[in-house]
Image (cartoon, rainbow, N blue to C red):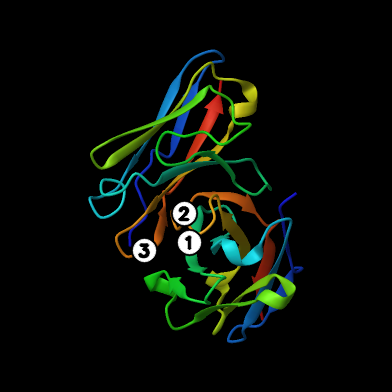
Amino acid sequence: QVQLVQSGAEVKQPGASVKVSCKASGYTFSDYYVHWVRQAPGQGLEWLGWININNGGTSYAQKFRGWVTMTRDTSISTAYMELSRLTSDDTAVYYCARELRGSWLTGDFEYWGQGTLVTVSS
Amino acid sequence: QSALTQPASVSGSPGQSITISCTGASSDVGGYNYVSWYQQHPGKAPKLMIYDVINRPSGVSGRFSGSKSGNTASLTISGLQAEDEADYYCSSYTSSTTQVFGVGTRVTVL
């Protein structure tokens, strides 16, 4: 069965960077786009961007351009999201999510990781 | 890209039907049939309930249905049940090949 397993919770100081991983299993990793979504405590969902696992192409929400980087390592079926210059506003649960259909980019997130809590605090 | 507009809360009694609206623009909701809806219970990851405006993934109850008119999409829950109490988010593909979520709607079963 399809699974997305994310790395564990992180505590970071303001100004630092965090890199969250998302290991996929149960399907052909390169066939599906992976997106990243975050949710601050008590707040709604916020889309950060996507990565084309096949060719490494990316697209980021305008708000995050310049300080988010999405990459992948196809040899270990893992996608990564790195966020730099962290502030307290970046405290949130970060999710990876897989598209419903292979090779499609429509934002239909059928499978989600379990979420990774990133806490930014001095 | 601004978040899509949803009512903050909607409530209904068991067995009733409720509808949640999701308003965007011609560059997102109105321009593409790629609107999806997610249900989220506290402490859980979101669950896909509707995709491509009207389609239900396998395993999602037929009580959930979607529609769209112009720049506004809607999710209707028929025969409301206690387990439907959750937060609901719409999402749309955009002309910038990005995604945008709605602000979310809290559904309360009275």
Q: Which residue is at 60% across, 20% downward?
A: B81
Most foreground residue, B46 or B65: B65
Q: Is residue A50 visible?
A: yes
Q: Amino acid at mark 1?
A: Trp
Above or below, A42 relative to B85: below
Provide the chain ID for the residue under circle 1.
Answer: A
Which residue has dot 2 on it?
A: A107
Q: Which residue is at 47% across, 56% downward?
A: A104
| Label 2–label 1 contact, CB within 8 A | yes
Whole-number angstrom distance, CA of label 3 to CA of label 2: 10 Å
**Nearer-N-terminus badge (2/1):** 1
Above or below, A121 relative to A4: below
Q: Amino acid at mark 3?
A: Thr
Q: Residue A63 sits in which quadrant?
A: bottom left
On the image, the x and y values in percent for residue B29 come to 31, 47
Provide the chain ID for the residue under circle 2.
Answer: A
Which residue has dot 3 on it?
A: B97
Q: Nearer the viewer, mark 2 or mark 1?
A: 2
Circle 3 SS class: loop
Which residue has dot 1 on it?
A: A47
Q: Give the farthest residue toward the top.
A: B15
Q: Which residue is at 74% across, 74% downward?
A: A76
Tell whether B78 sits left or right of A17. left
Task: Indicate which disc residue B70 carries.
Answer: none
Circle 2 SS class: loop
Most foreground residue, A50 or B1: A50
Q: Amino acid at mark 2?
A: Gly
